Image: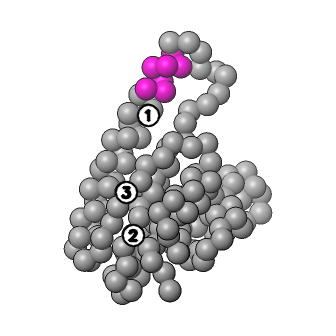
Amino acid sequence: MYDRILLPTDGSELAGRGVDHGLALAKALSLPVTVVSVIVPLTGFALQGIVQAEAMDSYNEGRRKEIEDLEKIIGEKAKSAGVVADFVSKVHLSPAVAILETAAERGCGLIVISSHGRRGISRLMLGSQTSEVLSEAGIPVLVVK
């Protein structure tokens, strides 16, 4: 049915629930997983010149370190579950687009993703990467709340 499961994560507790669910499913189905983390680049006109370059370097380095730490934690969980996992880190303005690109590039047949389940104005204000993945994906998406 599926050849590989994609597990997007931003390192949050909520995303961790989706990763854990995805790893359990991968174990039950004897499937490998790809874990994707997306770094959203700093943007804005408030930062200028050297300040902007320093802020971006600091931000990028901090995010890379967070992702390295996250990969170690998830890698250990996958290993304990007997699940083969590979990791992808992308820099992209839209996490949803990066998630969908990764699913296509890695031949994933299922995306397991978390959602806050926000509604109304809070959803409009904060956006929803999960909703965008759901609406644009050409493969099944399992949403974990």
Instruction: Name the element at disc 1.
Output: helix
Pointer 3: what residue?
87
Residue depicted at 64% across the width and 21% down the height:
46
Q: Is residue 22 above or below residue 8?
A: below
Q: Which mark is residue 60?
A: 1
> Could you give the CA–CA distance between mark 3 and mark 2, rounded to whole angstroms?
9 Å
Mark 1 or 2: the one toward you = 2
Is disc 2 surrounded by few (<14), some (14 to 19) or many (20+) residues within 10 Å?
many
Is disc 3 surrounded by few (<14), some (14 to 19) or many (20+) residues within 10 Å?
some
Q: Nearer the viewer, residue 106 or 65?
A: 106
> Could you give the CA–CA distance between mark 1 and mark 3, rounded to whole angstroms?
18 Å
Residue depicted at 41% across the width and 40% down the height:
63
Horizontal arrangement in the rendering, residue 68 relative to residue 119 (left or right) = left
Instruction: Identify residue type, mark 3.
Output: Phe
Task: Measuring from the top left, give residue 82's x and y in whole percent.
Answer: 25, 77
Q: Nearer the viewer, residue 104 or 137?
A: 104
Residue depicted at 37% across the width and 79% down the height:
31
The quarter of the displayed image where residue 75 is located: bottom left
Q: Earlier in the sequence, mark 1 or mark 2?
A: 2
Where does the C terminus fall, quadrant-wise?
Answer: bottom right
SS majority, magenta: helix
Q: Which mark is residue 33?
A: 2
Task: Measuring from the top left, give residue 144's x and y in whole percent.
Answer: 53, 75
Instruction: Identify residue type, mark 1.
Output: Asn
Q: Is residue 21 visible?
A: no
What is the span of residues highlighted in magenta in the rendered image?
51-57
